[in-house]
Each structure stands twice: as C-alpha cells, then as structure tokens.
Amino acid sequence: MQDDLDEWELRGRELKSRVNALIPQDFETLALDVFRYQAAFNPLYQTYLRMSGLAVEEVKKIDQIPFLPIELFKNYRVQTGFSPILFDFESSGTTGQIPSKHPVCDPIFYQQHAQRTFESLYGPLLDFHIFALLPSYIERGNSSLVFMMDHFIRASGSEFSGFYLNQYETLIKQIKEALKTNRKIWVMGVTFALLDWVDAGQDFSFWEEAVSEGRLMVMETGGMKGRREEWIRDRIHTFLMEGMGLPKIASEYGMTELFSQAYADQNGIFSPADSMRVLLREVSDPFASVTSPGKVGGIKVIDLANIDSCAFIETRDLGSLEADGIRFKVLGRFDNAEMRGCSLMVSQDFS
C-alpha cells in the first residue's frame, strides 16, 4: 500500500509540473501519461474502462481514450489518488436536479492555472478592473466560477474590482470611476444577468470612449440558469452588442467538471487553454469520431488540469471544430433522446 501511495504522489506531482510547463507539441504525450495515471489510481474510471472493454495497454492515441460521461459527477466521487479533499466545486443545476460535484484537493494549482490561461490570451490581470455580474453564482458558496473570479479580482489589485448582483447604479458608478484610470475594464457576466441589465433600460453611452479605444471587454459565461428563455449564442451576442453599443462580445467556456477554461474574443470561436483539447463524437454514436471542420458533434474534453479527478470528460454539449482542429464552437445541448450510448453507461452501478 505504501508503495502505491509513494508512486501516486510522485507521479501526480510530476504530471502537475508538466501541465504547468506544457507546450502544444507535447500535449498528446502528456495526455497519454495522464490517462495511464488515472487508469491506475482512479477507482471510478477503472470501473468505466473495464466496462468499455478496452485494455489500458491498447490505448496508443488520444482518440482511443474512453471519456467518462459527465453525469457521473452527479452521483459518484470522481477522484484520482488519495489527497484530502478540501472542498467541492458544485454546479448550480435547476430545482430538483442533482448537482455535479468536483473534488478540489489543490486549490492553489487551480488558481494559478486559471490565471495563466487568462493572461496568456488577454494579458496581466494587473491591467484590468474586473466587474463580475454573477448573481446566480454568488448566491452559492461553492461555484468554481466565483472561486476563479474571486482570485482574479484579488490578483488585479484594483480598488474597483468586485462582485455585483443587480445593483446597476452602483456598478455603473464604479465603472465610471474606473474609466478615469489607464486600466482596461472587464465586465464578466452570466448571460441572463447581462440581458437583464440591457432590459433595465440602461444608457451605455458612458463607456463609448473606452469602447472606441479598445479598453472595455464584456464577456458572457453562457446559460440562462432557468431565469430566461434559452437563446442561441448569436442571438445573445447581437442583443448585447446592440443594447450596449459594443462591436463584439467575448465568451468563456468552463464548467464545474473542468479545471481549464476556453475563451472566445468574438464570434463564439473558442481558443482552449494549452491543457485543454476538444474532440467530437457522432451524435448517434459515442464511439465514432467527428473530424471534419464545421460538422456538428458531441463535445468531449481532454482537460489535463484535472489531474486529481478525471481528465477525459464526455459532455452534453454540441459543437463544431474550426479548420485548425483546435478552436471550436459550442452550438447547443443534447436532449435526452440524443444521448443514447452514454445512457447505458450512466445507468450502471459503479459502486
């Protein structure tokens, strides 16, 4: 047993170091090493691999790796190794739904990784005043998004950065003061809250100059959380751009079950973190791959930052890949009837 503990600890520490120093050409090699590590030390994933009928030693490429259905985070502890669990990230869900839980053993690794991902695309957090309009998330104490944004707000060192519910007057007053400085403005909002802000009849002309100078970014996180009718992303972005007087809307793609994020500067085309890769499956067959650019398929995510849980996640999202095979779009969700293939696995007893 002690030998297993020593091997798990050494390998886990080494893999996190490699994630921190990852360069794109090493992604597949590291992904295969993480797969073997989790196949050895994640009991739930071991069971799933056994049910899939694929031996670990037969996996030579990342497209051969079995992906764990995301629904299993609702009913099972998805953990690799033996580290103490300090707390869980928990999804919001809707009334009556079982929330997903993602165990967090190393919050500092998560914070550093999230900051490195953001700054690689947008520059230092010290260059920003951050305004987080996240009412449905703030009302919960275990949201991964709130945890990430709290770290970002602190790291920004800005007296204006902070969280807001629906205090639009206070929010606008703070943004106006922040606009007097040389920093950029980042408004991060859950989608329904941004739409509600526009519907409140706000005049957004106060930030016209900052928009023309490229000093202001509005970013939506996706989802209505049962507060409004679901809209496709193009409709959301058009509504927000027209209502807020913006040439573009940025987006973030993340979830409770992932430690990595992807960001879209505009047009809903996401660039994933270096530790993240999106693969697609056929809608009607979870074991058939989609590789053609623009073709719609089910999103599977490799997230190498999920060292302590599972790095290979079959989501319920639909998307398409760009021609480079790396960037992607999120186009919607599977309905229950379309999830054939995963449903048999999810219904099994993994205990």
Image: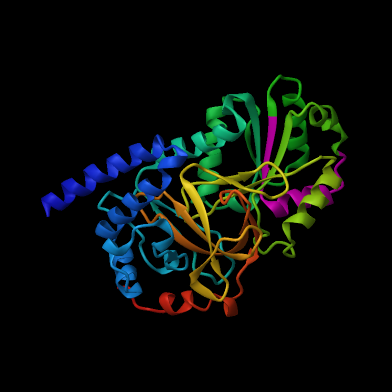
* Residue 143 seen from this side: yes
Which residue is depicted at the point 35% across and 62% down? Answer: 77
Residue 224: % across, % down: 68, 59
Q: Residue at x 25, y 45 (%)?
A: 11
Check residue 121 for magenta coloring. no
* Quadrant in which the N terminus is drawn: bottom left
Residue 54 image position (x, y, % from top left): 32, 70
- The residue lying at 78 percent from left, 47 percent from top is 197
Q: Nearer the viewer, residue 141 or 71?
A: 71
Could you tell me which quadrant the C terminus lies in?
bottom left
- Of the pair 283 and 247, the residue shown nearer to us: 283
Which residue is painted at 85% across and 40% down in the image?
245
Q: Position of residue 241 (x, y in %)?
A: 82, 45
* Residue 242 horizontal side relative to residue 176, left or right: right
Q: Nearer the viewer, residue 292 or 310?
A: 292
Give the image's coloring scheme.
Answer: rainbow
The answer to whether residue 193 is magenta is yes
The boundaries of the magenta stretch are 185-203
